[in-house]
Image: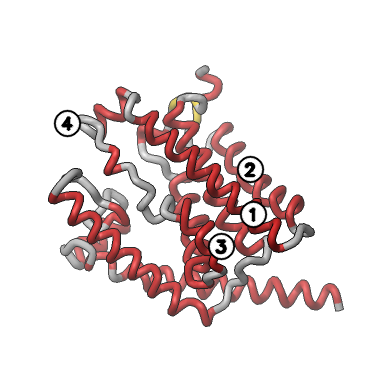
Amino acid sequence: MNGFSITPFRGLHLLLLLLTAAAALLVFLLLCKKTEARRSRLLIGVCLFNLALFVGYKLSLSMDAAYVSAYYPNGFNIFNELPLHLCNINLFLIPLGVWKRNRSVMGFSFFVAPLGALMALLFPEPLFSGFSLFLPRILGYYVTHALLVVCGLSLATLGFYRPDPKDIPRILKTFGLLAVGAHCINLLLRLTLCPEANYFFTYGAETDVLKLFWRIIPAPLLYGLPAPLILAGYMYAVCALSRLTRGAEDVSFS
């Protein structure tokens, strides 16, 4: 099984990234000419399949001795594995946004799901690198994040959401409400069932950027105030690129 070991930016890892991009293209090619109702059902179906896969993956972690010993010296706690982080919260936000045709939710999911999930794929934590792809911990991690990238991008490629700068204030409001909601959940869980709860990383994280934010504003939740500014810049850049792409398409078909 050593030949199937996955290490960032090496053979199998690069192949997985390529397959993720190919899957996004395949979804577009298979569904672009379907009716909107059918596209909705199929995309929601993929999201629900990914949610079921996520549940199985998280339950498998409770039987993974290496994972439990590294993260849970006092015993596995499922309340710290809920789909409430910045990327995997989109497991249910994407189908909700498509079902309700809510542009704020779809906009958040389009901008955040592919970005957050791609970061997880590119820069996995140590226990998700250097192991066989067929280990349940590894397979679940990479497949669920890859599908999040595919589903997030499909919001745009299948025509459910078109990036628009006018949406950015509402998307930032949605981001703020979700962050505050996650922090409230963290507070409740830390007082009751899960002392280490840290959804949306409102209590800090080990990444260099978040460490820098914490040094500037050493307070839970508030330390992340620079994040919306960075997200806004990223969203405006994507909207500008999307507008240029649409302009090029219009010229080519004129």
In the rendering, at what x and y percent does residue 176 appear? 34, 70
Q: Secondary structure at mark 1?
A: helix
**Mark positioned earlier in the residue sequence (1 or 3):** 1
Query: Residue at image x 54%, y 24%?
Result: 4
Count residues near mark 3 (Cα–Cα under 10 Å), then give few for <14, some for 14-19, many for 20+. some
Judging by the rendered image, the residue that carries numbered circle 1 is 41
Name the amino acid, label 1: Arg
Judging by the rendered image, the residue that carries numbered circle 3 is 99
Judging by the rendered image, the residue that carries numbered circle 4 is 74
**Mark positioned earlier in the residue sequence (1 or 4):** 1
Asked if the residue at tag 4 contacts the one at tag 2, i.e. Cβ–Cβ closer than 8 Å, the answer is: no
Name the amino acid, label 3: Trp
Cα separation between marks 2 and 1: 26 Å
**In which image quadrant can residue 243 be found?**
bottom right
Q: Secondary structure at mark 2?
A: helix
Q: Marks 2 and 1: which is nearer the front? A: 1
Count residues near mark 1 (Cα–Cα under 10 Å), then give few for <14, some for 14-19, many for 20+. some
**Mark positioned earlier in the residue sequence (3 or 2):** 2
**Mark positioned earlier in the residue sequence (2 or 1):** 2
Judging by the rendered image, the residue that carries numbered circle 2 is 18
Q: Marks 3 and 2: which is nearer the front? A: 3
Q: Marks 1 and 4: which is nearer the front? A: 1
Cα separation between marks 3 and 2: 29 Å
**Mark positioned earlier in the residue sequence (3 or 4):** 4
Q: Marks 2 and 4: which is nearer the front? A: 4
In the rendering, at what x and y percent does residue 237 appear? 53, 72
